[in-house]
Image (tube, rainbow, N blue to C red):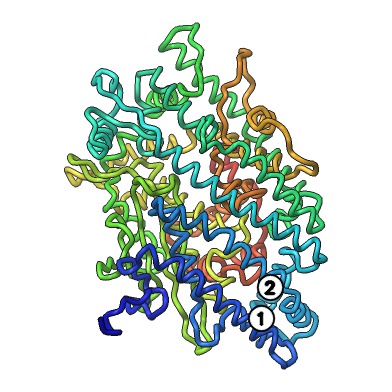
């Protein structure tokens, strides 16, 4: 065989694809490990070159080198890591999970080798103390670089560094194991129904989806899963209370069973590992460590937000729950005792009674292709950008669509991947990620981002296209808001661009976009009946608007309860040895509604499946969703005043926030847009907790 016919690892050469996008169609399983190991070797070579540089350390030959110069190489390790770990969540396999188990300790050791390299840190420290005049963005990069070393143990003695290595390597492996266990447990459960009478109450869309799910598994009848598009309709509409209980308990006891996927001990160890890491680095608790780089800054500020929300929303939540119980007793009799698996069912009944609206009424108007047009059209109306599907760009699964995004002047802005539906190898939930971040290279070329939004929206069936609920439209808008933050990025340094901001600021662009879901002017642009083409009626839009705050207080307390749970774990100063299930129930008790009857608590557990705080980036930071909700309500109030499609306001939002990434302190950016600091008032008014004055 000639040398020309020898296959090359695609990670080692130019991609030669549109916009240098990832050649998913050419990557094989065996390519990853080879690229990982060569990427590590190249990193080590570059670091040696930096620390052996005889010249005096400067911002340019030390900090800039680490950020944007690979001595002629692209960053191979970042290149392969980005693809591998994104696909590990979106399109995984047994082979990928096995390789992740193998590579994780190697990669963690490599990261530690860099951060704990005393010679490299000495150069960084010197530059931190002696540097030329820097721009604000350069100063932020230098501060982040120096602080990154310190927060990773650079100031520890050798014994401390060795201890930190062990702790971080163990935490890295446990985080991976947590995610793999959760995926396996979620995908392993099915509710298989063969008796058609047990489908009573379910809408046609749910029945068709369940039939398709059964056929995909070569089963007769209907299959329901723990994926949200399957789980939620069953819990909302099924009249089979015993099956609702079965499904509810399956979802809420995931990873607590006596099997190899049990996450309880992993969670306990993760809490202790993070506490030990923080205390080794000189912090009292892991939360103190985290909040050093958060807008909240102090534990007391987080608790003030959470307690203020409880004080504001709990009275309304009690009223909501009382109405729900009253509805249930009217239907079932005065002795009926409502349980957790009943709430969605009777909430639906109450919503119908109060507003004559439910999710199924709206589905026909939210056909996915129309929703895509609507969301893209909203971005066009606000920012002038356009989207064009490019089928030549390789994708990692047939479900995925790839779009070229063009700015209002017609110039190329970004690539957007959109991955809409659940499948076997895909984690639940929804998220935004990148395959390439934005930065400006040394030649002045603005390297544009490749952004991906990954969701688990209702799948099409043999009879119908993908018809979404309003909640799924909101999910799309949320992740699309994150993608705008990525696509509009316009920073010099990749580590400061796009969504590389503090975690209690990162949800502002995403939650801001959700506001449009109830706006008549927006719905009018895309909500047409998938069969008749008729626009969504005005009176149905009015019902959406009136029902917007249905059960909003109970929903708020649910989010606050998760924030309290997160804080309870990560404000621990001593070793955590409690049993997780009772600890969890005690931790969020302040946000729970009072029980009228004493009964044995359910043996359910959120912690064992709480990816955000166990395997994601929200440990000691789950409060961020509510923190950002205050920001997004405040920001959208500006648009409500100046016009929800006002392009000058939108441009200011883009210039001050969306394009700036982490180049400045987030409050500086927000105040530049808003003209002042946010208050909670706009959120309380939006939710109907605080009435607008006439």
Marks 2 and 1 in Cβ contact (< 8 Å): yes
Left or right, residue 635 beside residue 574: left
Instruction: Determine which residue is flagged by label 2.
Output: 145
Left or right, residue 475 beside residue 146: left
**Residue, x 39% and y 65% (percent of image)?**
30
Residue toward you, 160 or 414: 160
Query: Element at badge 2?
Result: helix
Looking at the image, is 584 positioned above or below residue 491?
above
Residue toward you, 230 or 158: 158
Q: Which mark is residue 162?
A: none
Report crowding for label 2: few under 14, some 14 to 19, many 20 or more residues within 10 A (C-alpha): many
**Residue, x 73% and y 72% (percent of image)?**
146
Query: Element at badge 1?
Result: helix
User: Marks 2 and 1, Cα distance to the nearest angstrom?
Assistant: 8 Å
Q: Which mark is residue 63?
A: 1
Quadrant position of the N terminus in the picture: bottom left
Spot occupied by residue 325 in the image (x, y as percentages of width and height) = 51, 17
Residue 310 visible in rendering: yes
**Residue, x 64% and y 52% (percent of image)?**
171
């Amino acid at each position: 065989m000639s040398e020309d016919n020898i296959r090359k690892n695609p990670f080692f050469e130019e991609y030669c694809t549109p916009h240098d996008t990832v050649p998913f169609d050419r990557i094989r399983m065996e390519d990853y490990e080879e690229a990982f190991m060569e990427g590590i070797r190249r990193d080590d070579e570059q670091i040696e070159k930096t620390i052996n540089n005889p010249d005096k350390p400067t911002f340019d030959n030390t900090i800039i080198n680490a950020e944007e110069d690979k001595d002629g190489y692209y960053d191979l390790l970042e290149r392969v890591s980005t693809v591998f770990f994104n696909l590990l969540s979106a399109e995984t396999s047994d082979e990928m999970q096995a390789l992740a188990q193998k590579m994780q300790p190697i990669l963690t050791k490599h990261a530690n080798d860099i951060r704990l390299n005393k010679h490299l840190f000495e150069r960084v420290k010197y530059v931190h103390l002696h540097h030329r005049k820097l721009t604000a963005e350069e100063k932020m990069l230098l501060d982040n670089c120096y602080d990154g070393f310190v927060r990773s143990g650079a100031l520890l003695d050798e014994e401390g560094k060795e201890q930190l290595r062990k702790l971080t390597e163990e935490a890295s492996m446990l985080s991976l194991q947590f995610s793999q266990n959760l995926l396996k447990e979620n995908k392993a459960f099915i509710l298989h129904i063969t008796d058609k009478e047990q489908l009573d109450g379910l809408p046609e869309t749910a029945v068709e989806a369940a039939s398709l799910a059964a056929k995909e598994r070569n089963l007769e009848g209907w299959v329901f899963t723990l994926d949200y598009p399957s789980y939620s309709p069953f819990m909302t509409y099924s009249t089979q209370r015993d099956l609702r209980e079965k499904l509810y308990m399956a979802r809420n006891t995931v990873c607590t069973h006596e099997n190899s996927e049990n996450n309880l001990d992993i969670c306990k160890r993760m809490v202790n590992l993070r506490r030990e890491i923080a205390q080794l680095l000189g912090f009292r608790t892991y939360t103190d460590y985290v909040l050093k780089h958060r807008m909240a800054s102090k534990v007391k500020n987080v608790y003030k937000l959470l307690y203020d929300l409880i004080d504001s929303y709990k009275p309304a939540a009690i009223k909501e729950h009382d109405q729900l119980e009253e509805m249930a007793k009217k239907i079932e009799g005065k002795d009926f005792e409502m349980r957790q698996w009943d709430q969605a069912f009777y909430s639906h009944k109450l919503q119908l009674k109060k507003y004559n609206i439910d999710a199924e009424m709206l589905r026909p108007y939210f056909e996915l292709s129309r929703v895509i047009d609507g969301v893209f059209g909203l971005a066009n109306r606000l920012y002038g950008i356009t989207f064009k599907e490019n089928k030549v760009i390789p994708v990692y699964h047939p479900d995925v669509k790839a779009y070229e995004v063009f700015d209002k002047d017609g110039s190329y802005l970004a690539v957007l991947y959109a991955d809409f539906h659940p499948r076997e190898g895909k984690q639940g939930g929804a998220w935004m990620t990148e395959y390439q971040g934005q930065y400006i290279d040394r030649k002045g070329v603005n390297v544009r981002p490749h952004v991906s939004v990954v969701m688990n929206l209702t799948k099409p069936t043999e009879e119908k296209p993908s018809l979404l609920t309003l909640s799924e439209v909101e999910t799309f808008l949320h992740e699309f808001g994150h993608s705008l933050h990525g696509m509009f990025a316009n920073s010099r340094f990749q580590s400061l661009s796009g969504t590389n901001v503090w975690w209690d600021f990162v949800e502002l662009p995403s939650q801001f976009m959700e506001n449009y879901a109830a706006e008549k002017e927006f719905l009018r642009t895309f909500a047409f009946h998938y069969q008749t083409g008729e626009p969504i009626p005005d009176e149905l839009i009015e019902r959406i608007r009136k029902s917007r705050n249905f059960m909003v207080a109970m929903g708020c307390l649910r989010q606050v309860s998760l924030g309290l749970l997160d804080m309870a774990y990560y404000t621990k100063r001593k070793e955590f040895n409690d049993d997780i299930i009772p600890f969890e129930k005690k931790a969020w008790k302040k946000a729970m509604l009072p029980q009228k009857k004493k009964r044995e608590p359910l043996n359910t557990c959120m912690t064992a499946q709480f990816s955000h705080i166990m395997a994601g980036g929200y440990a000691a930071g789950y409060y961020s969703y509510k923190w950002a909700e205050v920001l997004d309500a405040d920001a959208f109030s500006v648009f409500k005043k100046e016009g929800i499609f006002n392009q000058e306001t939108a441009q200011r939002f883009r210039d001050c926030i969306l394009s700036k990434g982490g180049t400045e302190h987030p409050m500086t950016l927000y105040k530049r847009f808003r003209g002042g600091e946010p208050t909670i008032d706009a959120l309380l008014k939006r939710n109907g907790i605080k009435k607008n004055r006439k």
